[in-house]
Image (cartoon, helix red, strand yellow):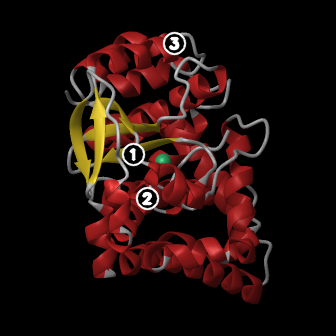
Amino acid sequence: MKIITLEESVLKLIESKLAKYPEHLNEFLTVPTGLVEVVNLGGMKLYSSESLKQDFLKAISTNPVTKSSMDVLNKLVSKDKIMPCWTGSNFLKNVLLKIFTQENILGLFIPSLNRILIIMNSSVNIFGFADETRLSAVTIHEAMHMSAANSRVNFLKIWKNELDLYYTSMFSLMFDIDKKDKQLQTQATAFYNDIYNTFEHLDPRKFKNSGKMLEAWELMLDKYIKPLMKISELSKQEFEDSLYNLKLFGKYFVKDFETLMANYMRFKSVFMPMFIAYRSIGAAKMPNTTVCQELFYPSEVICIGTLFPTFSKQKVKQALSIIKI
Ligand SMILES: [Zn+2]
């Protein structure tokens, strides 16, 4: 199972691919009865219906990730905050999903609509085990992003412990610092609070274009992370190299995402600590995802964490409950 974790990039990509391949817009041939067009995503028509909503809820109702939150999820679906939708278009399958995953379910949180779209193509078997599992995972993943965007202060309160552990562990590994060091813990916490308050609620597409995002982020690294050089086991040169690589990774993420994906393996020193840090919040093995968003959007850490069996279902429910309806 592979989770789409690249919402903003996916949106950008949809826009750019649609512009390049207008013929995909005409692929929609048959619309089953009862389905009504609900969203037009950059030209791609998406359809939903009452029975699709009911089937969706039924399909995720027994999954361990979703079952204890079904009352809140029912409400979110009935208020159209979470919209399961269907596209008969091969566009999703042929162009979009090929880039990220072989799966055929795509979750998107669209901040400007304050709505989550769970997009399925016609080959999804909503009551098949694999698809049920994926539907649940994708739904909770996107819902955590929505929760963070809707009620930032509360989201941070609910997940403080997990985020403290993750970012301390990540920087400890990246810069070879004892993870019990108090200064590291303080600076790691200050860093994620700052990126959270600066980037989490903004429309990333707007911010990215301005290039100010990158500038702001680099300043944060200089402010919170650079001073840790004196408690690091790395030499001055090694520390500076690590910081440089981290900045370069961030630069690609913001400015040229497709190049970052193409050269991802070159950045082991950056992404391995981001992977391994998931152990600090309960990952038994490496998450099957592409880590990168964590450097700008702390909610991503929680989204990934919701799939770990030890992650608090109570807190997930709490976080779902703060979504504004
Ligand atoms: Zn995500």
Percent from the top left, x then y, of residue 47? 29, 35
Is label 2 in contact with label 3 (beta carbons under 8 Å)?
A: no
In the visual, does 141 lie left or right of 273?
left
Lower sequence index among marks 3 and 1: 3
Amino acid type at image mark 3 = Lys
Amino acid type at image mark 2 = Val
User: Residue at coordinates 31% horizontally, 31% vertically from top-left?
Assistant: 83
User: Residue at coordinates 58% horizontally, 41% vertically from top-left?
Assistant: 304
In space, the residues marked 2 and 1 are separated at their CA atoms by: 8 Å
- The label number, if any, that marks residue 321 in the structure image: none
- Tally of marks: 3
Mark closer to the observer (3, 1): 1
Percent from the top left, x then y, of residue 298? 47, 51
Q: Mark 3 points at which residue?
A: 67
User: Residue at coordinates 44% horizontally, 15% vertically from top-left?
Assistant: 69
Position above or below: 74 against 188: above
Percent from the top left, x then y, of residue 150? 26, 39
Q: Residues within 10 Å of mark 3 (few under 14, many from 20)?
A: some
- The label number, if any, that marks residue 108 in the structure image: 1
Percent from the top left, x then y, of residue 222? 50, 78
In the visual, does 118 lie left or right of 239?
left
Asked if residue 228 can be seen in this view, the reply is no
Q: Name the residue under label 2.
A: 10
Dot 2 falls on a residue whose secondary structure is helix
Dot 3 falls on a residue whose secondary structure is helix
Amino acid type at image mark 1 = Leu
Lower sequence index among marks 2 and 3: 2
Q: Quick one: quadrant of the C terminus?
A: top left
Q: In which quarter of the image is residue 198?
A: bottom left
Nearest the eye: 17 or 256: 17
Lower sequence index among marks 2 and 1: 2
Is label 2 in contact with label 1 (beta carbons under 8 Å)?
A: yes
